[in-house]
Amino acid sequence: MTAPLIVQCGAGKMPGIHAVIDLYTGPLWSTLRKVRQELGVLPVPVYVLSARYGVVPVSRRVPSYNAVLDANPTEPHHVHPDSIVPLVSQQLRDHGIGVADFCGSQLYSDTLAAAGAVVGCRVGGTPFRHGIARAAMRQHLHHAAGRA
């Protein structure tokens, strides 16, 4: 079985309450929605790493929010990564995630790795060490669906 995929949140969001997969407006999320449409289903469990909500399945409905991870927060909506590590660690445990692939920036990758280290979750690995691009994410999901 292919490992779950965790995708970082994005700054662009739809207003209101939406399923996570429909909330974010950025290119990673539009690619994920397109792959779901192409395959009819996501072939692996997919989660968001949200600066506000932590690790959440993409099917969960959440309200739009204004928060981003920032190693040197200077704005009220900027969140220091250390502040969400306990929440993310607990959620990785609750979701039973022992290994995961990740798509996103280095800051989010490092935050997820720190949280994973607390509960013995290995993030990254083959083929994604520190995040993947949209094309690689698409290829990964198609491969997981047996359509590589």
Image (cartoon, rainbow, N blue to C red):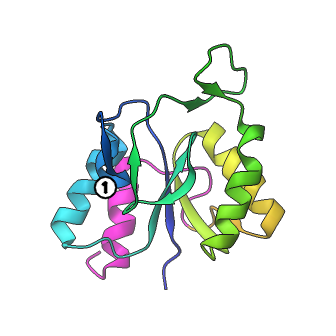
Which residue is the extreme one toward the top? Answer: 74
Residue furthest to the bottom in view is 1
Q: What residue sits 24% from the left and 64% below the top?
A: 36
Asked which quadrant contains residue 11, the reply is: top left
Residue 32 in percent (x, y) is at 31, 55
Residue 100 percent location from the top left of the image: 59, 67
Residue under the image location 63 percent in, 47 percent down: 109
Relative to 27, 95 lies left or right: right
Q: Is residue 36 above or below residue 129?
A: below
Work out whether residue 74 or residue 138 is closer to the camera in this orientation and state it. 74
How many numbered callouts? 1
Residue at 79 percent across and 70 percent down: it is 120
Q: Mark 1 Cα within 10 Å, few/some/many (few <14, many 20+)?
A: many
Residue 141 among those drawn in magenta:
yes
Residue 67 sits in quarter = top right
Residue 115 is situated, as x and y percent measured from the top left of the image, at 75, 55
Quadrant holding the C terminus = bottom left
48 over 76 or under it: above or below: below
Determine whether the residue tagged by mark 1 lies in a helix, strand or loop.
Answer: helix
Provide the residue span drawn in magenta. 127-148
Q: x, y percentage for residue 65? A: 45, 33
Q: Is residue 9 above or below residue 33?
A: above
Q: Residue at x 48, y 79 (%)?
A: 2
Q: Amino acid at mark 1?
A: Leu
Of residue 16 and residue 36, the one placed in the foreground of this image is 16
Is 143 situated left or right of 114 in this image?
A: left
Is residue 86 within the magenta segment?
no
**Quarter of the figure with residue 40:** bottom left
Q: Which residue is mark 1?
A: 32
